[in-house]
């Protein structure tokens, strides 16, 4: 797409942040075609009165952004234009990474680092507010740490986003239909369409509380009467910083700090460190992002992921094991069954042992390839937490690494592994839970039972899904058509044929809007609508556009995606780290990922 006859878009960067679409583009008028960012803003209504008001708002806000662009930590606005009743901003491309990964769910910042971040953000906001501009969407995603000088850059000013929600009343008057901002970070008065400078202070305060608690803002409890955030028991910070954060996020804007400068004055004074001149040649080199290459050539008919330093591979119909350098540790002399190979965990090591079928029975080998547990079971699973599930005569029990039966086969069905010290089992067509000694701790009463995750387990009652705690109490009612285990504080659920996410209180925090979803991993979740895959954050924002033919969840900072029939890997900004070139791939496990080229399998790895 050519915008304004000048800016040629290369690919879509995302639909997050409230803009219609965001593209990486090239400026065809300038020498070397330098890259830039093009943001397309589409009004909901194309009626003349709405378009005229959108035009006036767009012009006024663009002029303000032009002024802010003179400040080093705000992207320069190169151009703004209208094309086909849509509006476009052309901005400087900031080479860096946003702060989402630094705010991974469950991670807690120390106070020193948080105060340093608060200062950085508030110093930028102080400049913004001097120009009578309110950002209205301060959050980790809109703060980029620039590679060049490690400074923060504040992006995606939201006042211009109001164009997207302009429409007309029955009387024909233009009206903004929805508030600007991100749930969890948005202040009450901003929700009501009356943003103030202290609305940005509120957002920064919520970021601070998120940093010290490890919880997303919309997961934090609130007082039932005052609606103030109740977070003190979830963090360990000094009373001084506690008081500052509390004042930043007061529900009533009059009770908050009224300016960024006021908060900066309240924060502990920065520690002044005396500079020592170090010759440039003695300075340590900046760490470079890892680069990847094929480290084990594609030459195997079949492979699985590395586990405990070894990977199962097949050569001429025989199974062996290689190390991370591609050297055989166990020669390819073992019988291989392809159908068994597709089962989760089969042929992989866990606890120093790998299960495999031998002459129609299942046993375990050690890391030298010797039989450690004689094949005598009808089925066997990986060892986890010191036990492995086995099957004998259609009943399930658990063995220890010596092959001794710790829990006798007696269950009609049983979980593959213990999770959080409990395993679901079936007795007389009902499901309950046992502990690692085999004692029933939650009596059989459910139609099905899944593994515990983050203190809760998915169960079914009357064909509906809900969640229990470890006392067996139904804490989230069985009301969902489909539900999945909690991960990173959220669980995906299906309602009326669409998937969304709930938190641990059962509250719907991401509305059902997707054809399919996956659990959150590393702060992002893979989602699908129609035939396209992309990624959302825990606020439900699309941070990597739904544009891929197929994709994997993130693992080890990368996600495998397919474009035009070829697989590659992207990072969390959606940029290709490994260009699409493979016939098939697997997710990264550690620093290795299986890839397929020329109908043979090998492994990618980090260049050393």
Image: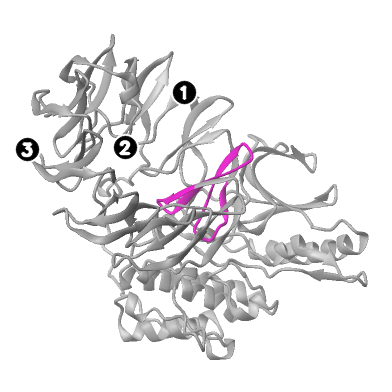
Q: x, y percentage for residue 504?
A: 42, 66
- Asked whether 425 falls inside the magenta stretch, the response is no
Q: Main secondary structure of the magenta part?
A: strand
Q: What element carries label 3?
A: loop
Q: Which mark sits nearer the N-terminus, 2 or 1?
A: 1
Q: Which mark sits nearer the N-terminus, 2 or 3?
A: 3
Residue lying at the far top of the rendered structure: 316
Camera-side residue of 452 and 575: 452
Give the residues drawn in magenta, as a range.
Answer: 518-544
- Asked whether 530 falls inside the magenta stretch, the response is yes
* Residue with the mark numbered 3: 402
Q: Is mark 1 on a helix, strand or loop?
A: strand
Residue at the image position 56 percent from the left and 24 percent from the top: 565
Q: Which mark sits nearer the N-terminus, 3 or 1?
A: 3
* Residue with the mark numbered 1: 582
Residue at the image position 54 percent from the left and 64 percent from the top: 508
Query: Measured along the vertical axis of the image, is residue 234 above or below residue 496?
Result: below
């Amino acid at each position: 797409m050519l915008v304004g006859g000048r800016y040629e878009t290369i690919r879509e960067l995302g639909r997050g942040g409230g803009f219609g679409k965001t593209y990486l583009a090239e400026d065809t008028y300038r020498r070397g075609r330098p890259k830039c960012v093009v943001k397309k803003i589409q009004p909901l209504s194309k009626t003349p009165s709405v378009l005229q008001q959108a035009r006036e708002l767009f012009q006024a806000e663009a002029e303000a952004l032009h002024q802010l662009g003179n400040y080093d930590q705000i992207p320069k606005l190169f151009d703004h234009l209208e094309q086909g009743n849509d509006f476009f901003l052309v901005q400087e491309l900031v080479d860096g990474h946003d702060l989402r990964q630094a705010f991974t769910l469950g991670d807690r910042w120390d106070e020193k680092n948080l105060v340093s971040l608060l200062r950085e953000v508030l110093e930028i906001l102080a400049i913004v507010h001097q120009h009578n501009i309110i950002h209205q969407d301060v959050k980790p995603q809109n703060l980029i740490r620039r590679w060049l000088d490690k400074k923060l850059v504040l992006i995606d000013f939201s006042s211009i986003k109001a164009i997207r929600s302009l429409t007309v009343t029955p009387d024909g008057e233009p009206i903004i239909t929805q508030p600007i901002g991100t749930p969890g970070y948005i202040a009450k008065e901003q929700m009501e369409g009356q943003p103030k400078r202290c609305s940005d202070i509120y957002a920064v305060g919520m970021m601070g509380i998120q940093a010290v608690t490890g919880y997303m803002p919309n997961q934090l409890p609130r007082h039932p009467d005052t609606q103030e955030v109740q977070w003190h028991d979830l963090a360990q910070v000094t009373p001084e910083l506690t008081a500052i954060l509390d004042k930043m996020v007061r529900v009533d804007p009059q009770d908050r700090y009224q300016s960024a400068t006021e908060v900066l004055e309240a924060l502990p004074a920065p520690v002044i460190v005396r500079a020592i001149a170090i010759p440039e040649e003695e300075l340590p080199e900046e760490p470079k992002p890892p680069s990847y290459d094929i480290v084990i050539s594609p030459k195997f008919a079949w492979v699985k992921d590395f586990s405990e330093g070894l990977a199962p591979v097949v050569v001429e119909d025989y199974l062996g094991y290689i190390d991370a350098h591609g050297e055989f540790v166990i020669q390819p002399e073992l019988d291989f069954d392809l159908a068994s190979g597709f089962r989760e965990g089969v042929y992989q090591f866990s606890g120093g042992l790998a299960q495999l079928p031998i002459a129609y029975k299942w046993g375990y080998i050690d890391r030298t390839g010797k039989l450690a547990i004689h094949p005598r079971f009808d089925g066997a699973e990986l060892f986890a937490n010191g036990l492995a599930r086995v099957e004998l005569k259609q009943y399930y029990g658990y063995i220890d690494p010596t092959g001794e039966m710790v829990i006798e086969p007696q269950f009609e069905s049983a979980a593959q592994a213990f999770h959080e010290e409990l395993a679901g089992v079936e007795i007389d067509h009902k499901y309950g839970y046992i502990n690692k000694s085999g004692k029933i701790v939650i009596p059989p009463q459910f139609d099905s039972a899944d593994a515990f995750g983050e203190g809760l387990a998915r169960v079914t009652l009357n064909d509906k899904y809900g969640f229990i705690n470890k006392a067996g109490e139904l804490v989230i009612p069985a009301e969902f058509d489909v539900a999945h285990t909690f991960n990173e504080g959220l669980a995906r659920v299906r309602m009326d044929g669409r998937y969304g996410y709930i938190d641990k209180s059962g509250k719907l925090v991401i509305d059902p809007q997707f054809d399919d979803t996956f659990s959150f991993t590393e702060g992002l979740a893979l989602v699908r609508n129609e035939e396209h895959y992309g990624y959302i954050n825990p606020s439900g924002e699309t941070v990597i556009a739904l544009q891929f033919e197929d994709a994997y969840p993130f693992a080890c900072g990368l996600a495998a995606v397919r474009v035009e029939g070829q697989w590659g890997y992207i990072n969390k900004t959606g940029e290709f780290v490994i260009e699409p070139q493979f016939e098939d791939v697997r997710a990264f496990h550690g620093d290795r990922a299986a890839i397929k080229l020329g109908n043979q399998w090998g492994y990618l790895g980090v260049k050393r």
